[in-house]
Every structure is written in structure tokens, then in C-alpha cells.
Amino acid sequence: MNYSGLLTFFLVVSCATRGARVADMSEAQLIERAQGIHERAITLDTHCDIRMSNFTAERNYTQDLSSQVTLPKMERGGLDVVWFIVYTGQGELNDEGYADAYANAIAKFDAIHRLCDEIAPERIELALTSDDVRRIDASGKKIAMIGIENAYPVGLDLSNIKKFHDLGGRYMSLSHNGHSQFCDSNTGERDDVWLHGGLSELGKAAVLEMNKWGIMVDLSHPAKTSNMQMMELSRAPVIASHSAARAVNDVSRNLDDEELIAVKRTGGVVQTVAFKSYLASEKHTANRAAVGAIRTRVADELGIELLDRRSVRALSEADRAAYDASILTVESAMKAELPTVVAQAPAVDVSDFVDHIDYIVDLIGIEHVGMSSDFDGGGGVDGWNDASQTFNVTLELVRRGYSEEEIGLLWSGNLLRVLDDVQRIAKEIQAEG
């Protein structure tokens, strides 16, 4: 039997074994079991984007905002830990671009600290270690952690890596959509134009600097060449903070089998992402077209102009809030027609998400897989479309036959183990001088 046949056989046997664990349980028993597991687990989502306007005294995460993540939604859904993202879009590789990017990053660090220190310190606290996570969880509060999406704000000064660590950053990707000063991005696949052939010399130095200070190296967004070089170079385990399996859905933001196996070799973890177009592109396209036709018609009837994402991002905070309110009006008016559309062109859902988890688990092992949403950055699937619906993921995992121990590893155990390893290795590097 060839390798492909062996792999297919292994996947089928593994899935069948998991399914046998719950074959005799009723629906009520499945839900009861999932509720108990969900309450006992520390549920952790490694990628939630933020909007600066949601971190003010007047408008913030203590309120039930339209954003996919708020404290009320976390509390309703039993989502314990969110990694808030210091995201910076890729700009020009010059002094002005680096200065603007640095200012953007610092503003987002400050916003996250403001939430935890001033706005809602009695409800959420910033964690820097796995011990912090467990201590804060035991206190009953929600937990914030910080990831850095795109190292562009570091500029050419690698001492900024330690500054970002000291501000709470615990993982960082070396690029986003567009080549950075550190490495090539996955977006090079669009036009086959590359800047570095993987990592630049500065990028190689940045990986070692991240190892030194205990920042996890994040493979989501860089090109495969960059990722393979990072994994070869890093002394510590790496993560993919929000990526899925390319073998299941062939898009450049997902990791192929070679990358997945290499992550396992480092001792790292892949945080499978609930992003519709990464999970099932054709299914998502069909659903989006069907729903979009209704949205356009309803918006026209209401006299509301629909904007694309770039135009929305260009709005002022006040105009964006007004636009969001108008979209809620459109969505409300659409509700009666949606069931018919969804029956004809179903949305990408929690089952599609867990299909990717199954694939990666079966390929590289349960110890190397976790979960992320990419909420407020385009993520979310039917059934897990905001933090209040987090239980549905646990329920689907129980339906698939995952044990309580395995679900605990997927939700947070694996990621926290990697964080521990990265921080331990950083201390060893620092001790070496």
C-alpha cells in the first residue's frame, strides 16, 4: 500500500475509534457530558482582533457590543482566555512606515492594558504565563493575553522585541499580508513575487531574539519558505496562531502536511482557525453569494448603501459606528428569508471547523493541535460566530468522540505547554549570556 493509502486508512480508523466512544449516548447525554467538560476546561482562543474604539471609558468590552468578543459574550459562552491581537497592516519598508507601525502597535498594547487595569480589572486580568492563566481562572475572572500579528512595528531595531515582550506580547508573526523587512508572506503566491526567498538576515536574527525573550514564533501568514526556515532555526517550539489544513482546503493561509509535520518536530502546536474561507472555500463562496443577493436587495429597499471592507476601514470611528448600526437593521430585515437560503447553500459551520481539527490531529497527534477563532478579524463559523457560542465547539468535539482529557489539550493544554517550553528555553538562552 502506498503512503497515501496508508494515511487514508489511518484517518478512517482513528475517526471510527473516537466515534465509538459516544455511539450509545443519547442527545441529552451528549449535551450533559459536553456541558460538564466545557465548565471544567480552560477554554482559550489564540486570535481575537481588536478595534481601538472599543477600549474607551464610554464604549468598551464590559458592554454587549456588536463585536464578536465582549466580556458578556465570553461569560455567556464560557470562553475563558482570549489573546487580543496587536495587529498592524503591512506598509512601506521605510523609516516613516516603521514609525507609524510602531505607534499603532503601542496604542493597541495600551488599549489592552487599559481594559485590564482601568476599565474592568474586577472581570479580566492580563496573563503572562501559564501559571497566571490557571491562577486567574481559579479566581473566576476572564483572562487576556497578547499576540502580535506582524513584526513590521519592530522596524529595524530588534531591541523592540524585548519591549514588546515587556508589554505582554507572547507570540509574534514576522509578516502579515505583504512581505515585511523580516520575511516573505504567503501573499507572494498570488503573483509569484518574493522579496527575500524566505527569511531576511534581519528575520533570522529576529527569530533568535524571540527565542531569547520568550516570545512564541507564529507561522500564520508568512510564506512556506519562511516558515520552514523559521522552524529550522528556532531553538524553541513554534505555533501557528490561526491556520487550518491545506490538504483539506487549498489556500495559501493554511499549512500543508510538510509544514504540519515540521511543527510537530519542533514540539509546537497548530491553532486551527474557524475562518470560513480557510475551512471550505467553495461552500463559503456559494453561501456568501446567496446571502449577499438577499442583503443587497434588502439594503436597496431600505435605502442603505453597502460598503466593502476597505471602505469600512476608511470610515471615521463615528461614521463606522453609524454604518454598523445600519447593517444591523439590514441583518434584522433579512432574518425571515435566511432559512430558505441556508437550506440551498449552507454556511460553513462548526462541523467544517472540526473536520480540520480531525485531520491535523490524525496527522501529527492530539498534543500538537489547538483552536482559534480570528473573531473580529473575519473569523467565525455558523455555530461559533461569537464568543457566546463557544460551547458549541466543545459539543461537536464530544459528538466526535474526543475524551475530556483530549478536549482539555485542544482548548488550552497544548498551547500553554508550548508557552512553558518557550519561556523555559528563553531563560536557558539568557543564562548562556
Image (tube, helix red, strand yellow):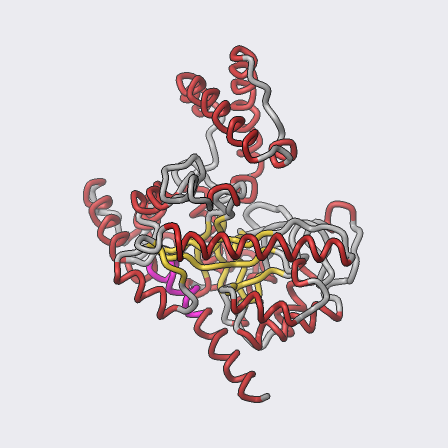
Q: Give the dominant element type of the magenta stretch: helix, strand or loop.
A: helix
Please state, as top left, top right, bottom left or bottom right, where the N terminus lies in the image.
bottom right
- What residue do we see at 75% from left, 71% from top? 201
- What residue do we see at 56% from left, 35% from top? 317
Q: Position of residue 289 (x, y in %)?
A: 57, 25
How many numbered marks, from 0 up?
0
Quadrant of the rendered image containing residue 31: top left
Q: Position of residue 127 (x, y in %)?
A: 40, 64
- The span picked out in magenta is 408-418
- What residue do we see at 38% from left, 55% from top? 81
Q: Position of residue 334 (x, y in %)?
A: 45, 19
In the picture, measured across the screen, residue 7 lies left or right of residue 397, that is: right
Q: What is the residue that sits farthest to the bottom in this orientation?
A: 432
Q: What is the residue that sits farthest to the top in this orientation?
A: 301
Relative to 19, residue 433 above or below: below
Q: Position of residue 433 (x, y in %)?
A: 59, 88
In the picture, measured across the screen, residue 380 lies left or right of residue 28, that is: right
Quadrant of the rendered image containing residue 416: bottom left
Residue 292 is one of the magenta-drawn residues: no
